[in-house]
Image: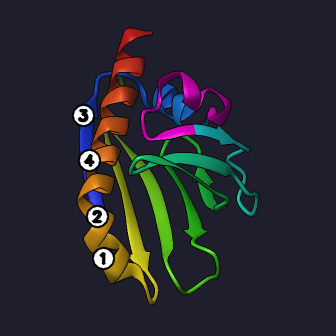
Amino acid sequence: MNIRTEIIINAPKEKIWDILTDFNKYQQWNPFIVMSKGEAIPGSHLINTMINGEGTMTFKPTVLKAEPFSYFDWLGKLWIKGLFDGHHYFQIEEIHPNQVKLIHGENFSGLLSKIILKKIGQQTRENFVKMNQALKNRAESN
């Protein structure tokens, strides 16, 4: 199952990249991933704390790619690989020098993916949209 969202942001791609990859500042603006630590370096691990229903959940995804100003992704798993895995990605497409389309999504797989997504899929999509809007607000106000 896949979740894919898009938003137009009136800011340069460099600014979007800087906000997305400055993980230590997520707590200042991000309503979905409320804390994050790490660096956008392929092979490294992030420590992300996200809103999950009524509480929070911390996971440690592995950064797969980090192509400055255009693409960033990670692969996370619940407990062990193959149960519930998430390939989370951000794609920045420049429309004009001061406008981008952000494509933000996740591809889910694993034995429990259908069961878990039936329960949290809609809420997860809503959280992606909230994060996109918060990113837009931050990028356009600074």
Quadrant including the C terminus: top left
Do residues under tags 3 and 4 come within 8 Å of each other at their CB atoms?
A: no
- Residue 135 place in picture, x, y as percent: 40, 29
Q: Which quadrant holds residue 132? A: top left
Mark 2 or 1: the one toward you:
2
Q: Which residue is mark 2?
A: 121
Look at the numbered disc 1 and give the secondary structure of its residue: loop
Q: Quadrant of residue 61?
A: bottom right
Residue drawn at the location 32% of the way across and 71% of the way down: 117
Q: Residues within 10 Å of mark 3 (few under 14, many from 20)?
A: some
Q: Residue at x 51, y 47 (%)?
A: 50
Q: Which residues are the magenta region?
A: 22-34
Horizontal and vertical percent position of residue 105: 36, 57
Q: What residue is shown with label 4?
A: 126
The answer to whether residue 43 shows anywhere in this view is: yes
- The amino acid sitting under disc 3 is Ile
Query: Looking at the image, is mark 3 or mark 4 earlier in the sequence?
Result: 3
Task: Give SS at disc 2.
Answer: helix
Q: Amino acid at mark 4?
A: Glu
